[in-house]
Image (cartoon, rainbow, N blue to C red):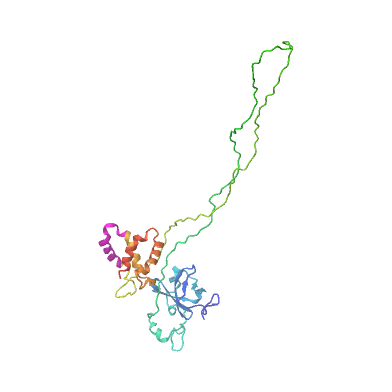
Amino acid sequence: MFENTSTGRDWSGRYREGLDVMDQNGEKIGKAGETLGSYFNMDAGFLGMKEYYVPFSAVTDVTDDAVFVNADKDRLSEMGWDQRPDEREGYSRETAAGGSEFAGRTGASTTEYAGQAGGARMSSDRDETLELREEELRARKQQVETGNVQIGKEVVEEQRTLEVPVTREEVTIDRRPVDRQPSDTPIGSDTETIRVPVREERVEVEKTPVVYEEVGVGKRQVTETQQVTDTVRREEARIGQTGDANVSGAAGGTWESAMPRYRQQWQQRYGSSGRWEEYEPSYRYGHELRSRPEYSGRSWTDVESDARSDWERRNPNTPWDRARDAVRETWEDR
């Protein structure tokens, strides 16, 4: 039974090999391996070249994806976990039929660990993996008030002129000569006066309010594209070889070893049209593209669309048309 003695929790039903091992700050420190009684081994470091022996008493939680321990990633050596359990003070060897101190290790046989008494660890056929991560840009949108529009009314005075036709009366005098004849009325005795009223039309101004226009207020959605630029990081594999070690599947080796040849090819073809530093990212991208398993065995015609999308996402400031020839040249250099 794998038990945390401080909490009494039994992890035997949830622990399994291959889980990520996380420290108390949530940072990954290695991969969980096989069990050794009340311990399990953990592969850490570059390519899992460093091995630690973690007591189950240090386990604080086990999820579907990870094992959490109460230790700090940078202080593992201080915990004494870099020593084998049988080398620690007070460690009790578990013995079983056959006398192997590793009999309690899940799936282990006496023969398998017989050569480990001298401190040498036998190699395993288990494949090791190195996870490469990269940062992606994600944009979030939120509604913000950028202003407002107010519509009201105010009275504005202005002068207007209206032409109105009016009628008025004028007195006309019509004089006509007559035949001379005697009059019975003596001069001065007739005092009759004729009064003729004269009229005219006068204009009175009357103001009446009328509706001359309507103002409608509404809103509409306007969509535009904004560019968001930031710097992202990604992890790339660096493969080093020492001695006679052979590395297969490395897509032509590391970029550092392949770069001089590509630079020489570039110099022969395009050397007079620019600087190598401007073209190197395109050649390097094509070199790394060849190592991706999802593109293995495919022609340039098949992969160009995916490569273009990936390139434009990673290098928004460099057009694909500028990088395409160098990427293709490296891709087809098999």
- Residue 52 position by quadrant: bottom left
Q: Residue furthest bottom?
A: 97
The image shows a total of numbered marks equal to 0
Tell me if 330 is positioned left or right of 56 in this view: left
Q: Which of the two residues, 120 or 270, is positioned nearer the viewer here?
A: 270
Q: Position of residue 93 (x, y in %)?
A: 46, 83
Q: Position of residue 146 (x, y in %)?
A: 53, 51
Q: Residue at x 27, y 66 (%)?
A: 261
What secondary structure do most residues of the magenta stretch adopt? Answer: helix
Reply above or below: 165 against 153: above
Q: Residue at x 26, y 57 (%)?
A: 272
Specify the segment rendered in magenta: 258-277
Reply above or below: 94 against 59: below
Tell me if 33 is positioned left or right of 172 in this view: left
Q: Position of residue 7 (x, y in %)?
A: 55, 75
Q: Which of the two residues, 246 or 273, is positioned nearer the viewer here?
A: 273
Reply above or below: 326 against 146: below
- Residue 331 position by quadrant: bottom left
